[in-house]
C-alpha cells in the first residue's frame, strides 16, 4: 500500500500541491517518499527514506521546479528498503518517463525473468520498475500513450494504480481492470490532480471530478490540459475492502462510498453481536477503530470513552516495515486512562486483527490498568489468506486467524470475549464488488500456486532483512563447515560471521575461536559474549550432545535437531527400529551387546554383511565385510576391544545391500519438508568403488539416479518419517540426510544423518540460489512452507584430496602448495591447519576441489584440470568422480 499523487498546472509550479497532498496521504505509507518534477526534457528528483515532513522543506521548491510532477509515499510490500527502490522511478533515455505505483504485480517473477533473458539490467528489487519499463519501451518505439498503456494491461497481472509523467508532454494515470487500488481525479482552475484518495484534494482545494475507472488509461497534455481517456480492459470489479476498513482516510470517498459512513455501518452492524448487559464502556483503538466504536456505542446505548490515548507522534503500527518495530511501537503507542477503566467491563473496538501484535498488547495494557473484563471486537472478519495486491500480508504464517480458531485467538489475546464481524455483514456495510481474497482465498486474476509461493517467499526474505542483520556462529572445522561459511557469507542478512573452531579456509571469512565443540556451557557463553543471533551446528557430535537444546534454553536460535531428534544419527539401532515401526524401506538387522551372540548371528547369515557401531564413530563405525571372518573381527574390535569406546558398546548387524548409492537431503521443520537437489557421493576410497568406506571421496550434483523416484521418496520415506516423529513426540528441525541404495528391490535406506552431508554440502550449496539464512530461519520458526528453494541449473563436482593412508592411519603436518594457482574453482579446506603463514595437512580428507559449470563434463574437467596445481606429500584422490553418470550420458 502506498500513496501516489500527480499534478499538472498550466500556469504555476506544482511542488507545493504535491508535498501537501503527500502529507495528507502519509497514512498510506511512512517508510520513504519521493517527488519528481518535470522541466523540458529533464526530471528533477528528490527521494529519501523518511516521512514526507522530514524530507521536504520550503527550500526544495527552488530545486523541484516544474508544471508537472508526481509524488509517492512508500509502504513497502516488496523490495528490501534500499534507496534505489524508492519511487517515483524514471527512465534515463529520451523521451524520459517517470512513474509512481501503488499495488503489486502478481506475475512479477515471470516479468523479471523475461527482462533478464532479453539482456535488460534491473536496478531495483520492486515490480514498479518492470511496469515502468514495459510502458516506456513501448512508448519509446511508437510514441503512442494508449498503445503503451495497452502493453501494461496485456503484460501485468495484479493491482496497479499508476501516475506518471512523459517529459515535456503531460501527465498520465492508469488503473488496473479490477480497480483494486483507488485512484481519483480532481480539478482546480487550470490544474488537475490525480491521487490515491480524495483527502489529497481537500487540503489544496481541488474539486473531486470522478474516480479513474478500472481498466482506464488517462492522459492530460501539458500545453492545453486536453484530457484524453480510454477504457482499455474491463474485468470484474474487485475494490480492496481493507481500504474502507483500515487504510483509507475517513475523509475520503472511494468509488462513491464514504469511508467514514462505511465504518459507521460496520459499528451499527456490530451492535447485534454483543451482550449489552455485560459491557459498561466501549472504547476504540485509535484511530481507525474510532468510527465503528462511536456508532456501536450509539446503537447499543453504552457509554463511549476514549480510554486508550495515542501518542500523537507514533506511526501506524500495521504498516511498519518489520515485526520487531511493530512490537516496540505498540508498547509505546497507546496508554490507558486508568481512572475511567479500572474495575470496568469494557469492549475494545479495532478495525481488524491481522498479526495479533497490537491486540494482545492492548489487552495486556488494559488488564495491567485494572480492567475487570475485556471483550475485543474486530470490525473486519478473520484474515486468513495472504494479500498479493499491495498490502503487506503476503505470508499466511503471519495471520493469527490462519492457524487458530476463534477460541484459540481469544486465549492468545488473553481477552475474555472475542467478536468478529461476518463476511456478509462486511459486504452490507461497504459494497458488494470488493476484493475479499484475504478473507476467502478467492483472488482476482487467479494467481497460480507457484506465483503465490514465490511472492510469499520473497516477502518473508525481505522482512527478515528489515528485522536486523545477524551475527552467525558456525560450529565445526571441516569441509562441510567451510562450505556453509561460504554460503552464509553471501547472505544479505549477515552482519558478522564466527566459527568454532573453524579452519584456515573459514578464517578467511570468519572470526575463528578455539573452543571445545562438545562443551555446551563454553559454547553458550561464547554465543552470549558475541551477541550471536543464529547458530549453525555442523558435526554430529555436538548435536547428539544436546548443544541445540542448550542454545534454545539460553534463548539463542540454533539450526539443527535437538538431542532427542539427533538419535536418528547417534544410535543406529534407534534409527533402524524407527524405520521398521513406521514401514520405511529398511533392511533386516539385529542389535547386539554380547560378542558371542553377534558372532553366532554373523555365521548364520554369512557374507557379505554389514557391521555397525551403534553410536557415533567419526564416520568409521560402519564396516562392509566381504567374509564372515572380517565381520567377526570388526564385531570383536567393537564389543571386546572397545575400538570406538562407548559408541561401540552395542553394534547392529544388517544385510548388505547391493546397488548404487545416492544421497537425499531435505530441510525439515517437523511439519513439512523441502528437498535439496539430488547428489551422489563416492564412499569407497579407491576408484571403481573399491576398498574400505570413507567419509566420502567426492560427489556431484545433480544426480539423475533419483530423478524417477521423486514420488517414492516423498510417499515412502519422508511422509512416513514425518508421521513417525509426530507420533513419537520428536521435534525435528534441521537437515535430514537419507543415505540410499538403489537396489533391484527398489530404494533402501542405508542410514539417517541429522545434519548436512560431507562432501554433499560442498556440491549442493553452490547451487542454492535462495538465501540460506532465510531457509534456516524458516526451519527454526516452522515456516518452511513459506520458503521456495531456488536452484541453479549448473552442475557441481567436488573431488576430495586425501592424505596417503586414509581412511587408515595417515601422517599430518605436510605442507600444501599451489592453492594460489587454481583458477575457476573453490578450494574447500577440510583437514588443514595454518602455521607461520603456510597451510599444512591436519586430517584424512584435506581439501575439496569444487567446480561449477553448465554441464557435468565441464564441471568434472574443470575440477580435475586444477588438481595438478596443488601438492602435498602423500596426496591421493579418486580419478573417477561422476564417471558412472558420464558413461550413462555417453551410452
Image: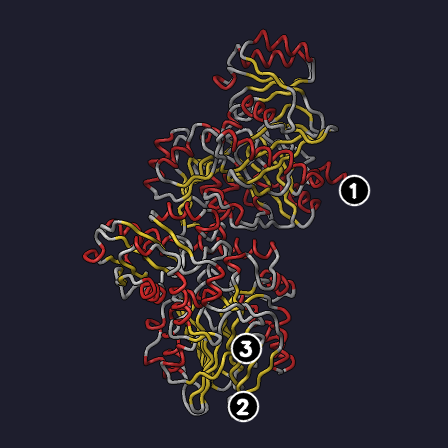
| Residue 864, disc | none
Residue 320 visible in this rendered orientation of the protein: no
Q: What is the x, y in percent for residue 675?
A: 59, 42
Label 2: which residue? 226
Q: Residue furthest left?
A: 339
Front of the two marks 2 and 1: 2
Q: Are marks 3 and 1 in contact (CB under 8 Å)?
A: no
Q: CA distance from mark 2 to mark 1?
A: 69 Å
The quadrant holding residue 796 is: top right
- Is residue 633 or residue 657 the one in the foreground? 657
Q: Earlier in the sequence, mark 2 or mark 1?
A: 2
Label 3: which residue? 213
Q: Earlier in the sequence, mark 3 or mark 1?
A: 3
Front of the two marks 3 and 1: 3
Front of the two marks 2 and 3: 3
Q: Earlier in the sequence, mark 2 or mark 3?
A: 3
Dot 3 alpha-carbon crowd within 10 angstroms: few under 14, some 14 to 19, many 20 or more: many
Dot 2 alpha-carbon crowd within 10 angstroms: few under 14, some 14 to 19, many 20 or more: few
Residue located 52% across and 30% down the image: 727
The quadrant holding residue 589 is: top right
Horizontal side of 38 relative to 154 (left or right) equals left
Q: Is residue 612 above or below residue 265?
A: above
Q: Is residue 889 above or below residue 41?
A: above
Dot 1 alpha-carbon crowd within 10 angstroms: few under 14, some 14 to 19, many 20 or more: few
Label 1: which residue? 890
Callout 1: helix, strand or loop? Answer: helix
- Is residue 471 or residue 294 the one in the foreground? 294
Residue 36 visible in this rendered orientation of the protein: yes
Callout 2: helix, strand or loop? Answer: loop
Amino acid at each position: 500500500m502506498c500513496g501516489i499523487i500527480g499534478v499538472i498546472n498550466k500556469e504555476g509550479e506544482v511542488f507545493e500541491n504535491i508535498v501537501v497532498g503527500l502529507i495528507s496521504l502519509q497514512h498510506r505509507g511512512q517508510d520513504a517518499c519521493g517527488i519528481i518534477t518535470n522541466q523540458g526534457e529533464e526530471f528533477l528528483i528528490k527521494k529519501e527514506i523518511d516521512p514526507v515532513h522530514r524530507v521536504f522543506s520550503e527550500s526544495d521548491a527552488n530545486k523541484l521546479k516544474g508544471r508537472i510532477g508526481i509524488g509517492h509515499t512508500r509502504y513497502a510490500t516488496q523490495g528490501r528498503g534500499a534507496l534505489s527502490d524508492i519511487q517515483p522511478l524514471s527512465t534515463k533515455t529520451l523521451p524520459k518517463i517517470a512513474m509512481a505505483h501503488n499495488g503489486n504485480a502478481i506475475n512479477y517473477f515471470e516479468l523479471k525473468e523475461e527482462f533478464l533473458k532479453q539482456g535488460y539490467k534491473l536496478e531495483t528489487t520492486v515490480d514498479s520498475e518492470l511496469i515502468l519499463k514495459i510502458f516506456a519501451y513501448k512508448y519509446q518505439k511508437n510514441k503512442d500513450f494508449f498503445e503503451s498503456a495497452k502493453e501494461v494491461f496485456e503484460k501485468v497481472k495484479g493491482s496497479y494504480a499508476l501516475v506518471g509523467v512523459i517529459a515535456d508532454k503531460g501527465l498520465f494515470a492508469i488503473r488496473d481492470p479490477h480497480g483494486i487500488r483507488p485512484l481519483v481525479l480532481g480539478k482546480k482552475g487550470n490544474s488537475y490532480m490525480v491521487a490515491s484518495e480524495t483527502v489529497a484534494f481537500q487540503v489544496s482545494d481541488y474539486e473531486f471530478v470522478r474516480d479513474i475507472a478500472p481498466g482506464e488509461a488517462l492522459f492530460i497534455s501539458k500545453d492545453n490540459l486536453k484530457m484524453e481517456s480510454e477504457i482499455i480492459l474491463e474485468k470484474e470489479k474487485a475494490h480492496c475492502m481493507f481500504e474502507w476498513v483500515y487504510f483509507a482516510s475517513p475523509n475520503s470517498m472511494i468509488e462513491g462510498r464514504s469511508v467514514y459512513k462505511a465504518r459507521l455501518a460496520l459499528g451499527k452492524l456490530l451492535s447485534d453481536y454483543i451482550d449489552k448487559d455485560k459491557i459498561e464502556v466501549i472504547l476504540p483503538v485509535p484511530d481507525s477503530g474510532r468510527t465503528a466504536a462511536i456508532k456501536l456505542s450509539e446503537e447499543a446505548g453504552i457509554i463511549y470513552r476514549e480510554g486508550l490515548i495515542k501518542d500523537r507522534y507514533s506511526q501506524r503500527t500495521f504498516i511498519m516495515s518489520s515485526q520487531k518495530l511493530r512490537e516496540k511501537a505498540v508498547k509505546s503507542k497507546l496508554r490507558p486512562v486508568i481512572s475511567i477503566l479500572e474495575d470496568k467491563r469494557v469492549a475494545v473496538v479495532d478495525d481488524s486483527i491481522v498479526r495479533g501484535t497490537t491486540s494482545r498488547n492492548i489487552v495486556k495494557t488494559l488488564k495491567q490498568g485494572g480492567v475487570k473484563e475485556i471483550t475485543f471486537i474486530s470490525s473486519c472478519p478473520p484474515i486468513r489468506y495472504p494479500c498479493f495486491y499491495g498490502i503487506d500480508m503476503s505470508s499466511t504464517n503471519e495471520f493469527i486467524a490462519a492457524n487458530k480458531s476463534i477460541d484459540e485467538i481469544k486465549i492468545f489475546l488473553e481477552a475474555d470475549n472475542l467478536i468478529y464481524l461476518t463476511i456478509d455483514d462486511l459486504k452490507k456495510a461497504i459494497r458488494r464488488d470488493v476484493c475479499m481474497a484475504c478473507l476467502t482465498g478467492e483472488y482476482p486474476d487467479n494467481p497460480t500456486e507457484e506465483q503465490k509461493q514465490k511472492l510469499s517467499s520473497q516477502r518473508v526474505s525481505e522482512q527478515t532483512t528489515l528485522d536486523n542483520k545477524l551475527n552467525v556462529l558456525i560450529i565445526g572445522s571441516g569441509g562441510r563447515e567451510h562450505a556453509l561459511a561460504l554460503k552464509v557469507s553471501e547472505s544479505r542478512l549477515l552482519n558478522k560471521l564466527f566459527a568454532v573452531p573453524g579452519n584456515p579456509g573459514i578464517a578467511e571469512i570468519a572470526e575463528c575461536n578455539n573452543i571445545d565443540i562438545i562443551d555446551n556451557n563454553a559454547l553458550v557463553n561464547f554465543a552470549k559474549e558475541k551477541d550471536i543471533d543464529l547458530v549453525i551446528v555442523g558435526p554430529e557430535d555436538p548435536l547428539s550432545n544436546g548443544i541445540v537444546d542448550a542454545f534454545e534454553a539460553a534463548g539463542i536460535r540454533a539450526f539443527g535437531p535437538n538431542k532427542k531428534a539427533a538419535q536418528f544419527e547417534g544410535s543406529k539401532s534407534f534409527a533402524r527400529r524407527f524405520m521398521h515401526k513406521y514401514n520405511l524401506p529398511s533392511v533386516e538387522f539385529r542389535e547386539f551387546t554380547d560378542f558371542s551372540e553377534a558372532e553366532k548371528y554373523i555365521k548364520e547369515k554369512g557374507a557379505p554383511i554389514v557391521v555397525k557401531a551403534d553410536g557415533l564413530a567419526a564416520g568409521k563405525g560402519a564396516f562392509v565385510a566381504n567374509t564372515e571372518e572380517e565381520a567377526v573381527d570388526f564385531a570383536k574390535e567393537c564389543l571386546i576391544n572397545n575400538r570406538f569406546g562407548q559408541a561401540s558398546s552395542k553394534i547392529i548387524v544388517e544385510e548388505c545391500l547391493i546397488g548404487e548409492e545416492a544421497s537425499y537431503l531435505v530441510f525439515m521443520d517437523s511439519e513439512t519438508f523441502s528437498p535439496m537437489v539430488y547428489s551422489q557421493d563416492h564412499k569407497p576410497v579407491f576408484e571403481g568403488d573399491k576398498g574400505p568406506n570413507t567419509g566420502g571421496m567426492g560427489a556431484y550434483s545433480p544426480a539423475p539416479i533419483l530423478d524417477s523416484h521423486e514420488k517414492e521418496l516423498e510417499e515412502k520415506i519422508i511422509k512416513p518419517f514425518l508421521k513417525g516423529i509426530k507420533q513419537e513426540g520428536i521435534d525435528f528441525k534441521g537437515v535430514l540426510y537419507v543415505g540410499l541404495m538403489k537396489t533391484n528391490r527398489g530404494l533402501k535406506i542405508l542410514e539417517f544423518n541429522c545434519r548436512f552431508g560431507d562432501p554433499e554440502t560442498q556440491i549442493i550449496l553452490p547451487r542454492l540460489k535462495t538465501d540460506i539464512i532465510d531457509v534456516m530461519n524458516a526451519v527454526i520458526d516452522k515456516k518452511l512452507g513459506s520458503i521456495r528453494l531456488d536452484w541453479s541449473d549448473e552442475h557441481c563436482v567436488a573431488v576430495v584430496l586425501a592424505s596417503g593412508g586414509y581412511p587408515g592411519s595417515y601422517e599430518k603436518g605436510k605442507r600444501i602448495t599451489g592453492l594460489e594457482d587454481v583458477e575457476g574453482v573453490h578450494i574447500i579446506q577440510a583437514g588443514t591447519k595454518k602455521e607461520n603463514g603456510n597451510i599444512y595437512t591436519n586430517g584424512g580428507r584435506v581439501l575439496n576441489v569444487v567446480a561449477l559449470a553448465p554441464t557435468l563434463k565441464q564441471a568434472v574437467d574443470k575440477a580435475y584440470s586444477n588438481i595438478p596445481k596443488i601438492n602435498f606429500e602423500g596426496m591421493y584422490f579418486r580419478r573417477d568422480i561422476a564417471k558412472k553418470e558420464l558413461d550413462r550420458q555417453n551410452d
